[in-house]
């Protein structure tokens, strides 16, 4: 789930308009499998005794009670529960949807972790070459960062300076996995001198690698182009 989704749920209370005489208790906490019990506990915090609660029902968001108005809210991210405690003014509890709660409560082994692999070259480069790792060792088809877990390459960024370029030159930053190039790469046109940059992202699970795979970065120059000070980051995501 995107980071902004949780923020939306937390901020819902500030933008919702409740047209009811009793009040609505808004929470963005997680729900256990026994949603009714959790909502009952929330109701108790509002001064409603558990013994008075007669039923807890999930509200159909497509058929809201007349007392409620959601306004400009993404209803796919929320759930509303009606707590009947023996009065004509039930309590409504707003919380994250079960789908999003399941995402929040994933075990740590299932949550994607991102890391950055640092490559670079702090000298003048007149021809194609592999970048160096953060240790200063120049990569190759066999030399690079060895992956300790399986995962995906999810991002690539490059900053470099073009010293000179004659004609239509270009620079391609190519990721190699086990000595084989992959299609995900940065491309910088050499149409003018100066500091240039490029960055791209990729979805999780598209460009994958296995434990023990070696990742290195190759700079391929096309045309009469001279560059220097290449700074490169590869974002990897593992579970």
Image: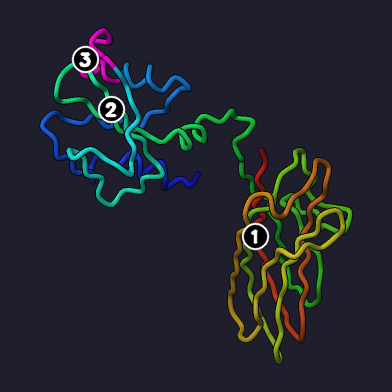
Q: Which residue is at a point 21% across and 14% down the rendered structure image?
A: 48
Instruction: Work out whether 202 lies above or below 109.
Output: below
Instruction: Work out whether 175 lies above or below 214.
Output: below
What label sits on residue 82 in the rendered view? 2
Residue farthest left in this picture: 21
Q: x%, y% of residue 88?
A: 14, 23
Instruction: Work out whether 37 lies above or below 23.
Output: above
Q: Is residue 216 left or right of residue 18?
A: right
Q: Nearer the viewer, residue 215 or 59?
A: 59
Q: Which residue is at a point 65% across and 75% down the rendered structure image?
A: 188
Crowding at dot 3, Cα within 10 Å, few <14 / some 14-19 / many 20+, comes out as some
- Residue 29 magenta-highlighted: no
Viewer-side label of 2, 1: 2
Give the residue at mark 1: 156
Viewer-side label of 3, 2: 2
Q: Nearer the viewer, residue 196 or 37?
A: 37
Give the residue at mark 3: 48
Give the CA distance from mark 2 to mark 1. 47 Å
Q: x%, y% of residue 234?
A: 67, 55
**Mark 2 or mark 3, which is nearer the start of the sequence?**
3
Instruction: Work out whether 222 lies above or below 149.
Output: below
Q: Nearer the viewer, residue 11 or 200?
A: 11
Residue farthest front in this picture: 63
Label 2: which secondary element:
strand
Q: Nearer the viewer, residue 117 or 88?
A: 88
Give the CA distance from mark 3 to mark 2. 13 Å
**Count of marks, rendered view:** 3
Q: x%, y% of residue 104?
A: 49, 33
Q: Which residue is at a point 61% across and 83% down the rendered structure image?
A: 193
For the record, the magenta segment spans: 42-54
């Amino acid at each position: 789930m995107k980071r902004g989704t949780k923020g939306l749920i937390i901020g819902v209370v500030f933008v919702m308009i409740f047209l009811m005489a009793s009040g609505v208790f808004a929470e963005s906490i997680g729900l256990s499998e026994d949603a009714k019990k959790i909502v009952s506990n929330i109701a108790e915090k509002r001064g409603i005794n558990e013994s008075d609660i007669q039923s807890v029902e999930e509200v159909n968001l497509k058929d809201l009670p007349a007392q409620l108005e959601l306004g400009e809210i993404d209803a796919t991210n929320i759930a509303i529960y009606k707590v009947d405690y023996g009065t004509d003014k039930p309590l409504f509890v707003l919380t994250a949807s079960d789908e999003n709660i399941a995402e929040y409560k994933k075990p740590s082994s299932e949550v994607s972790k991102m890391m950055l692999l640092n490559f670079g070259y702090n000298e003048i480069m007149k021809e194609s070459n592999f970048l160096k790792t953060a240790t200063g060792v120049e990569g190759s088809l066999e030399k690079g960062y060895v992956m300790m877990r399986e995962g995906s390459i999810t991002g690539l960024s490059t900053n470099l300076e073009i010293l000179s370029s004659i004609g239509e030159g270009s620079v391609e930053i190519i990721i190699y996995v086990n000595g084989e190039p992959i299609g995900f790469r940065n491309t910088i046109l050499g149409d003018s001198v100066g500091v240039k940059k490029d960055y791209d992202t990729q979805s999780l699970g598209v460009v994958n690698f296995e434990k023990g795979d070696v990742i290195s970065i190759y700079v391929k120059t096309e045309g009469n182009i001279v560059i220097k000070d290449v700074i490169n980051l590869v974002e990897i995501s593992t579970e």
